[in-house]
Image (spheres, rainbow, N blue to C red):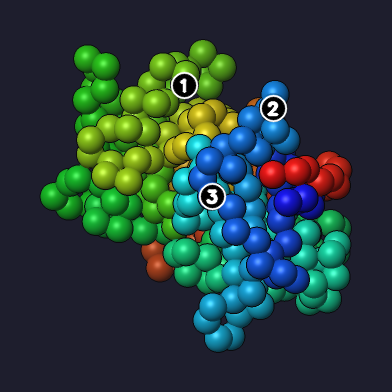
Amino acid sequence: MKLTFTKMQGIGNDFIVIDGYSSPVNLDAATICRLADRHFGVGFDQLLLVEKPTVEGVDFRYRIFNADGGEVEQCGNGARCFVRFVHDKALTNQREIRVETARGVIFPKLEDNGLVTVNMGEPRFQPAEVPFVADQDELVYPLQVANQTLEISTVSMGNPHAVTLVSDVDTAPVENLGPLIEHHVRFPQRVNAGFMQVVDAHHIRLRVYERGSGETLACGTGACAAVVSGIRRGLLQSPVKVTTRGGELTIAWDGAQQPVWMTGPAETVFEGSIEI
């Protein structure tokens, strides 16, 4: 079978996007892994599948698969690429759309300047909602990792995140600690591990070791989680510029029971097809 795809990127977080809206597409985990291989396949951090919605009142369904073939709940950089894709493919002419995800509805909007703003919904902090093994919601938790105690903040942005402060993201042990945090027993569904350096109250630098993909050049939900945790701890003030290795996002959050807003670019790299 020949599979047609669009390769896209959002500040270096790269995807292949597949139109399963016009006609259904079914891919198993092994096929996704082969496609994700950067030597023998196409190569990507996540595969995004555009489908018809399964609930009323929304325009599309958005499914996300990591490079290991596992389906996950949310992807912020992918959401921006999603809205760019459905516009470019003339699947909609609406600038703001309603998109069904595994963790609820999001509202990405194509701005006049070409950037995309996404209402990412309310962050969740209760341990059971992350999920994270703890008795109650705390701003910071101790986490035993590799014979040391890390201080982490946990938050769900539709997917689980653990954020730890570092003095310099360039020298942070992301490759060593990232997989240990991801697979820690206190995260029953694994976790995305964020390493945040506070530059000032409106600017952070961030690296994220993503669940099922390893370190990526950028992580949209990771940027949201880092900013939210920093605001809760009194370290940051909205809006916040987030500098990643792939580029910059702007994250805004007005506090408890309010949605997180993410703004950034989304670009098409190339179109292609591959036999699977």
The nearer-to-camera label among 3 and 1 is 3
x and y, in percent, of residue 38 in the image: 68, 27
Q: Secondary structure at mark 2?
A: loop
Q: Amino acid at mark 3?
A: Asp
Q: Quadrant of residue 86?
A: bottom right
Residue 80 rendering spot, x and y as whole percentages: 69, 55
Q: Identify the amino acid type marked 2.
A: Phe
Q: Residue extending furthest bottom? A: 56
Question: In the structure shown, which secondary structural element does the residue marked by tag 1 occupy?
Answer: helix
- Residue located beneath label 3 in the image: 28
Q: Residues within 10 Å of mark 1 (few under 14, many from 20)?
A: many
Q: Is residue 51 left or right of residue 272?
A: left
Residue sitting at x 69%, y 44%: 276
Up/down of 214 relative to 114, above or below: above
Name the one closer to the observer, 176 or 251: 176
Q: Using residue 173 as the reference point, say whether residue 143 is left or right of it.
A: left
Look at mark 1 in the image and give the residue it sits on: 174
**Which mark is first along the chain, 2 or 3?**
3
**Which x, y percent locates residue 218?**
62, 36
Left or right of 172 in this view: 32: right
- For residue 108, the mark is none
Crowding near pointer 2: few (<14 within 10 Å), some, many (20+)? few
Q: Position of residue 51 (x, y in %)?
A: 64, 68
Which residue reaches farthest front? 1
Tell me the kind of residue under disc 1: Val
**202 or 51, which is in the foreground?**
51
Which element is circle 3 on? loop
User: Which dot marks residue 40?
Assistant: 2
Q: Residue at x 55, y 71 (%)?
A: 100
